[in-house]
Amino acid sequence: MTQTTERLDALRAKMAETETDLVVLAPGAHLAWLLDVRPHADERPCLAFVSASGAAFLMPALEADSARNQTDLPFFTWADDTGPEAALKEVIAELGVHEATSLVLDETMRADHAALVTDALPGAARRFAADTVGALRMRKGEGEYAALKRNARIADRAMQAAWAAMRPGMSETQVAGIVRESFAGAGAKPLFTIVGAGPNGAYPHHHTGETVLKPGDAVVMDIGAASEGYSSDITRMALIGDGPEGYAEVHEVVERAVEAALKAARPGVKAHVVDDAARGVIAQAGYGDYFVHRTGHGLGTEVHEPPFITASSQTVLDEGMVFSIEPGIYLPGRFGIRLEEIVILRADGPEILSGLPRTAETIHD
């Protein structure tokens, strides 16, 4: 049985469980995960339809030949001079769905493409993919875990390469360039390289720029890349010399917040409990106003995907889920500290994918 067949079978089981008659996916992460199909995405509707008994594509004729190399599912093609409406009706008839269908739409689908589908099924009850394809994607299989683990080690080496080369007088962009070169040398596509020196580290999503590293700076380094269709994401700290005044105290608080979140993360626990644990440590230490984002996010074929580890999330954590634990404290005008681990949830708790310690790396002249 192929991976695609296994995933289609799993989706149909979820559809039966959730009383879903039809799932419609657009080019993007859901479709790539389910069918390993990555058609060109533009204004022309290109949609995959999955029912309890069949699957087919609404396919622009312009894309059909190249897409045929990726799948043997039936195509219902349409041309620019005729439009997609007639072909869409043929898909619906072929799959045996009707106006009263319970319909799931890909939440990343273009609004005009979604309207095309809902107009063709005017009585359908519409949901998004969270409890079908999304629920399946949250629970990683061992093959996915292995790819994520390999990616984590590639990111570890990129971080170490940057530390080995960093010196006072270098710019943030120069440090980021070293990270990207390391990723590329390992066959990974760089996705982001946040390097925030000194006060810039107080911006959680600082745009890496020409700020020069100087003695006394704390440097936030948040990096990630894609390989084998999966992503990496890690944040560590570097100190230029001794770092800024008060750094050690704040780092210790963030470290305790990470440990509290790791301890709280167990199968059967709601995601907000993990956020509560990290946030509680930081608030108790007097820095609650300076922890300005969620504790974590899922990681897989996308850098940010469910589950989201937020103060309001009711998602029940389960074995096989992969997500970040990344509390932070951001002191305006001074420095920021974020420590991030990617974990896979096992029966007895989280397994950390990175092999790097969370202690700050000291950079000497």
Image (cartoon, rainbow, N blue to C red):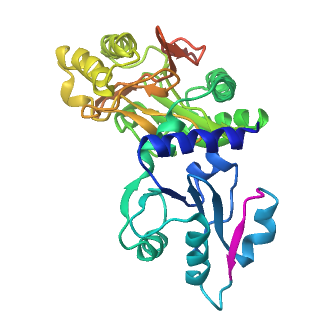
Q: Quadrant of residue 251?
A: top left
Magenta highlight on residue 72:
yes
Task: Name the one closer to the observer, 138 or 75.
Answer: 75
- The residue shown at (69%, 76%) is 77
Q: Give the range drawn in magenta.
A: 71-78
337, above or below 19, in the image: above
- The residue shown at (17%, 14%) is 284
The percent coordinates of residue 160 (x first, y second) are: 64, 21
The percent coordinates of residue 179 (x first, y second) are: 65, 34
Q: Quadrant of residue 225?
A: top right
Q: In which quarter of the image is the N terminus?
A: top right
77, above or below 170, in the image: below
179, above or below 93, in the image: above
- Residue 82, can we see it? yes
The percent coordinates of residue 257 (x first, y second) are: 32, 15
- Residue 212, can we see it? no
